[in-house]
Amino acid sequence: MSDLVRMQGIDKRFPGVHALRAVDFDLRAGEVHALMGENGAGKSTLMKCLSGVYQPDGGRILIDGAAVALPNPRAAQDLGIGIIHQELALMRDLNVAQNIWIGREPRLSLGRIDEARLNADAAAIFRGMNVAMDPRAPVAALTIARQQMVEIAKALSFRSRVLIMDEPTAALNDSEIAELFTIIRRLRAEGVGIIYISHKMDEIRRIADRVTVMRDGATVGTVQAAETPIAQIIAMMVGRELVDEPVAIPDLSAAECALELRGITRGREVRDVSFSLKRGEILGFAGLMGAGRTELARAIFGAEPPESGEIIVHGRPVTIRSPADAVRAGIGYLSEDRKHYGLALGMDVRANIALASLARYTDRLGRIDEQELAAVSNRYIDMLSIRTPHDRQEVRLLSGGNQQKVVIAKWLLRDCDILIFDEPTRGIDVGAKAEIHRLLADLAGQGKAIIVISSELPELLRLSHRIAVMCEGRLTGILPGGASQERIMALATRREGMAAE
Amino acid sequence: MTGTQATIPAQQRRSGAARQMLLAFASLIALVIGFSLASPNFFQVSNIMAILQATSVNGVLAVGVTLIIITGGIDLSIGTLMTFCAVMTGVVLTWAGMPLILGVLTAIGTGAACGLVSGMFVARMKIPPFIATLGMMLMLKGLSLIVTGTKPIYFNDTPGFTQIAQGSVVGALIPGLPLPNGVLILFLVAAVTAWILGRTVLGRYTFALGSNEEAVRLSGVNTDAWKMAIYALAGGIVGIGGLLISSRLNSAQPALGLGYELEAIAAVVIGGTSLAGGRGTILGTLIGALIMSVLTNGLRVLSVAPEWQTVVTGAIIIVAVYADQLRRRKASQG
């Protein structure tokens, strides 16, 4: 079988980073080729070179054996290379069909757009995908999972021969993933070459034919997906073997209660939620998308303050009307969308770590003690092993896992002893994930009270001392750590009407 | 089932935008009724026509800058560009003695060319729109003064020039409705621009750029070229504004222009267009411009000092945007 794509000796440098070092990669027609590696390994950069977003500094790209130039995304699209970006690249103010056909609108005379055909063509793509979607729905009103479907439809609309998917399942639930895989298999059967970037090992086994692993901007090797043990792939990725330990549940019977909620209610998203959390405990929150877990977290944190109910911190009732109140009470919230809510991306590591604690490092004249801040931020960089060249590096240049650690450092410095983690490892690779997990366990060991919201059950099971399950805004039950996935799912789907049964 | 989930919020969203427009429109109606009750002189055909005529220049400028604001940009140069267009028209008509139609084309062409230059600063040279158009604003003001030698150019030698804004084609056809041409031109410009925004590729990219420029670029669209086209179109519209004002004054006044850009932006904002980009309507801008001139006119009819008119206009801007914020906060809470 001939190569559809061959990338040879691709080299790419950014200021201060050698992102790709002579990378070789090839893709055949009719295969799913998984590209794996820790964040910062260079997968996304390599794919941006293939899709014309970045220009490599060295090496060449061959399509059907002929060297091509990809000066811009349009050139790549014209060669049949479609990409679904990790950060959804949609225009929120436009509708679904308008997003799919952006740049290729069917035109009438005078530059008018043929909306009817636009909508009909979009509807046809969704029919082919077996997805129910109104082409006229505004994208801003869709869930992330459904926005992803729009991205996929958009990529399909190019009749791409090469389809790059950068973590397409990061925000999808199981049935949506199954749907996606059906689409991928059909495309593969039609001879499309698919490059599939993911951190989820089980997905790779289900969908990929070959796996190429990258580390530190170079390829480590390419193996057959079916024949290679997962442990070996992980070892290739991190350069060491990882062991998966079951959660050790500490004895917390004597521990002080750090946080107690009584009847917290906000709208229809959070309904009459009560629970307590001890120092040193990790309480996991499970539930389907839209179960109200993030809304609960934001209510506790005062981002959208509760309408009724009581919050008791260390035995004292507190009134939380704003995040400032929550932080004063020692509650820190690590948003699922750290780029939007957790970090000042254009500022450096030091400034981000200090962001919530500046008053402490400011003298009476309002001058900031940069020396002290440098010492403090370097201490946290060491403690959390944040991989950054120095503390003045801009946070946007760090990988996802390291950005997450910067947010953690921020709240630790602020002396928050109740930490709410919302999808702490979303978009973070296996190696960094294990590190974040270890970090959470360590924090609990130091007496912090921790809430973890995660859509990945294995992650919750690995971390949580107890698991709270929500469904449609209500807390449907709290299970001991290590509970079976079946019991969790049963609670996660126990809707109000069914509760009586 | 998933299909219906997607459509319900869509309807909510649409009704939200409609409510916003309704709010602005209701405020306009309330102002008109209020002033009519307060003074018998307000709701007279002659006064209404005066209000409309007073809206025409600001309205046209506001329609132009609406395009740029929807892309997520801003244009501070439209006031002095308007003047520069008027000056160039004066050069062509009065100094060179060319026929009227060439003067009209000069105004629109000058506007479009300057818009293209602004667009190039923003799109190609990546200068933030605020800075790029601030620079343009000053350069154009200076150029107007240089070209004219700081003296106004009169259009006395071009019969018919004043008819562009002050004549009334409608009045000739329908006696009793002396709608000035300037107002007719405003409505035509607004209608065509609304059509471009709603129906054409250029309009689609205007919204798309303001919504997520990077996504548009990644979709293979030549964003720089389209952005320049949008700035050029807006410039052309400003050129029409230059024609209107010089026709009304029967002269190109080189010192005029500064401040017009802020009035126009105010009208856009009152009309509900988001300065964050991605959202906005021409009808809203039109209503915004009308609210401003109704207010000015009404307060004058009530003999309120002009200083206070300015204060009230400022307050209206704050109230309009705050109302929009409140509405949005409610909407986001579902």
Image (cartoon, rainbow, N blue to C red):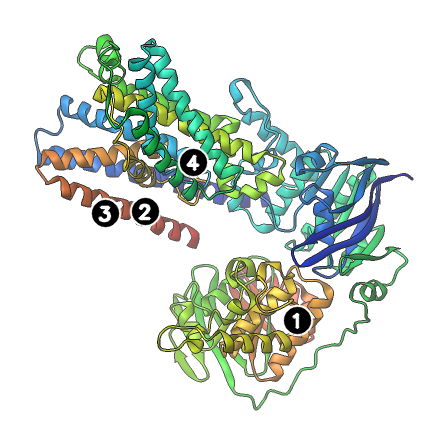
Give the SS element for disc 2: helix
Which mark identifies residue B68?
A: 4
Tell me the residue that label 1 is attached to.
A436
Residue A435 locus on image (x, y percent): 69, 72
Tell which subunit mark 4 falls on. Answer: B
Query: Is A122 located above or below residue A218 in the figure?
Result: above
- Spatial distance from mark 4 to mark 1, Cα to Cα? 45 Å
Tell which subunit mark 2 falls on. Answer: B
Left or right: A296 in relation to B83: right
- Spatial distance from mark 1 to mark 3, Cα to Cα? 51 Å
Q: Are marks 4 and 1 on the same chain?
A: no
- Density class for disc 4 (Cα within 10 Å; few <14, some 14-19, many ≥20) is many
Instruction: Tell me the kind of residue under disc 1.
Output: Ile
Task: Kindly identify the residue that appears in the image at 23 percent across and 25 percent down.
Answer: B151
- Density class for disc 2 (Cα within 10 Å; few <14, some 14-19, many ≥20) is some
Tell me the residue that label 2 is attached to.
B321
Instruction: Tell me the kind of residue under disc 3.
Output: Ala
* Residue extending farthest bottom: A254
Q: How many marks?
A: 4
- Spatial distance from mark 3 to mark 4, Cα to Cα? 24 Å
Marks 4 & 2, CB-CB < 8 Å contact? no
- Density class for disc 1 (Cα within 10 Å; few <14, some 14-19, many ≥20) is many
Query: Is B173 located above or below residue B328 in the figure?
Result: above
- Spatial distance from mark 4 to mark 2, Cα to Cα? 18 Å
Instruction: Tell me the kind of residue under disc 4.
Output: Ile
Residue A311 appears in view:
no
- Spatial distance from mark 2 to mark 3, Cα to Cα? 10 Å
Give the SS element for disc 4: helix
Which is more toward the observer, A148 or B234? B234
Marks 4 & 1, CB-CB < 8 Å contact? no
